Structure formats: C-alpha cells, structure tokens
Amino acid sequence: MGPNEGDREFSLSGTGSSSKDFDNSSFGISGDYGWYFSNRTLAGIRQSINFADIEGEDLTDDFWNGSTRGFIDYHFGQNAARPFVGASLGAIYGDGVKDTGIAGLEAGLKYYLLPTTFIQARAEYQFLFDSGDSAEDNFDDGAWAYTFGMGLNF
C-alpha cells in the first residue's frame, strides 16, 4: 500500500468558506504533481487558484488569484494512515494581492483507501516576501491555508 521510489503522484484538493448569509464567499482548488525520490520523500509542483466574492456597504467585487509553488514532503509510516511534513516555495499573483514570493511550512495526513488511492488533509502556514530580508520579517505575519482532497500514485 502506498508509493514506491520512482512513483509519481497526482492530487486535487479544495477549500471554501461563506458567511452565514452567503454574501461573502471564497473557494479554491489546488492540483499537485510530484515524484517520489524514496518511499517517503515526495517533491513536486503545486498550482492553486482561488476566488473570493466580497460584498460591503460600498463594495461588491470579485477577486481571483493564483500561486505556483514547488514543494517537498516527508511521509511517516507504512500503513494506510501516513502523516507528512514539508515546505513550499513559489509565487502568488492576481487580483487583490501583490505579485510576490510565497513560502510555507505544511503538515497533513494521507489515508490510503486503496493501494494507490488516498484522501488527504493539509494545513499550510504561508507567508509572503519580495526579498530575503522581507521573508524573515514577514514570517510572523503569515496565514493558515487548509485543504482537503484526494489523489493517486502511479
């Protein structure tokens, strides 16, 4: 059950939220594609797209943004439940954000339903930067991003 060295992985994850009156909503989708350098180490690329519809007293606007990040994750265990930790680095762009660098630390859990098919939950602590100095300064001003999805190894 689970990947072997040399296997590839593809996963789709989503996230979303709305106010109780559904007048402020957001949703996003992420796709990951990666390669296993060992049975436990996965490196790859992640593409995320997010949409927010925000209403205010004098404001009704839609915001789109995206991010493209490289990532590396280390998985623990050999059973159906496999926790992982990792990091990502890339760029964020779009409406309502300054086109800039984005980095993050992440942790999650994959649960294999079939030998090559899993569901996953991931939490990422992300922060923005435009230089090495600003990365250090902005780490404390980061935000949490949560996703839930499914994937397969092949």
Image: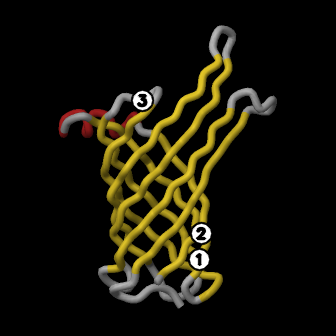
Query: What's the amino acid at mark 3?
Result: Val
Few, some or many residues within 10 Å of mark 2 (<14, 14–19, 20+): some
The answer to which quarter of the image holds residue 16 is: top right
The answer to which quarter of the image holds residue 40 is: bottom left
| Marked residue nearer the N-terminal end (3 or 2) | 3
Q: Where is residue 88 drawn, in percent x and y? A: 35, 55
| Marked residue nearer the N-terminal end (3 or 1) | 3
**Could you say whether the residue bearing mark 3 is in a helix, strand or loop?**
loop
The answer to which quarter of the image holds residue 20 is: top right
Query: What's the amino acid at mark 1?
Result: Phe
Image position of 59 (left or right of 88): right
Using the image, determine if residue 102 lies above or below residue 12.
above
In the rendering, which numbered label is found on residue 73? none
Residue identifier under label 1: 118
**Could you say whether the residue bearing mark 2 is in a helix, strand or loop?**
strand
Residue placed at 65% from the left, 82% from the top? 113
In the rendering, which numbered label is found on residue 150? 2
Q: Where is residue 37 drawn, in percent x and y? A: 30, 80
Residue identifier under label 3: 97
Query: What's the amino acid at mark 2?
Result: Met
**Is the Cβ of the residue at disc 1 closer than 8 Å to that at disc 2?**
yes
- Please identify the residue farthest to the top as the structure is shown: 58
